[in-house]
Image (tube, helix red, strand yellow):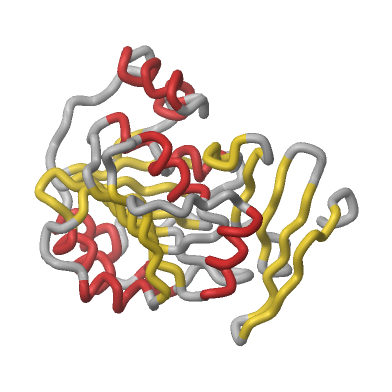
Amino acid sequence: MFNKGEIIHHSRDKLGSILVIDYRKHRVLTFNSVFEQSKIDRRYPHLPVHEYSRAMLLPAAFIRPRHVTILGLGGGVMASAFHYLFPECQVHAVELRQAVLDVAREYFGLPESDRLLVTIADARNALNDAPDASTDLILADLYSADRMSPAQAKRQFIESCSRALSPDGWLVLNYHRTPDAEGPYFRQLRKHFAVLLIFKSKTNNTVVYASKRPFEAMHPKDPALASLEKRLPIGWSRLMGRVSRL
């Protein structure tokens, strides 16, 4: 993986390695594995490169969030994107590792802003501490070097997210493999959310969207997507065309 890139940072904490690798146009964060935790265009750090990261932003077409919660900071590309896209929005990111936050600030252009708060904590504890209906959008992207955090696949996690979300809120989950649509996890999601949607990326990530309320489906040629594209060019229409209902 590293043979075409230059390692510009390598540090370790008690959970393992953190590497930053520069390629010609891009910068990558990895925990010393085949998985890229974050990838940015070095000229535009607020612009996600990974298709699944871009897909995780799609609820911005349906809701104008006042508050966004991001579980798992990585290089901070989600936090940077929402901070850039909605100038009036408060963004709260929760990250387990202080060393990851340090790298996101130094190498990935994570803004120092009074609208962006980063808490170093276990995401489960942060969710339990969140007041009821205190956030409009939760994006969960909890990964170690080689796998998704088991916490993200627990029913208790869904309950905590549902409680913390506002009545019009959305939960977005990044999965490395698609969970069983008829299994207990999706039954739990259906108990708490009115609509479930799914997006499969070309790298086999599955993004699950859960909306607290029903909403009008959006056609890929909707003007709202064109407006978002002008502000953050990630191919909103093309991505929306690949979302399906569960």
Q: How many marks?
A: 0
Left or right relative to 181: residue 158? left
Q: Tell me residue 15's x, y (percent).
A: 60, 82
Give the residue drawn at x 66%, y 35%: 43
Left or right relative to 152: residue 204? right
Direction right: furthest residue: 3
* The quarter of the displayed image where residue 173 is located: bottom left
Q: Is residue 69 above or below residue 159?
A: above
Q: Tell me residue 97's x, y (percent).
A: 52, 75
Q: Pick whichever, 215 or 48, lies toward us.
A: 48
Q: Is residue 82 above or below residue 217?
A: below
* The quarter of the displayed image where residue 221 is located: top left
Q: Tell me residue 139's x, y (percent).
A: 36, 53
Q: Is residue 149 above or below residue 64?
A: below
Residue 155: tell me if it is visible.
Answer: no
Left or right relative to 155: residue 239? right
Q: Tell me residue 192's x, y (percent).
A: 15, 57
Give the residue drawn at x 33%, y 36%: 86
Q: Pick whichever, 32 or 213, lies toward us.
A: 32
Give the residue drawn at x 42%, y 37%: 84
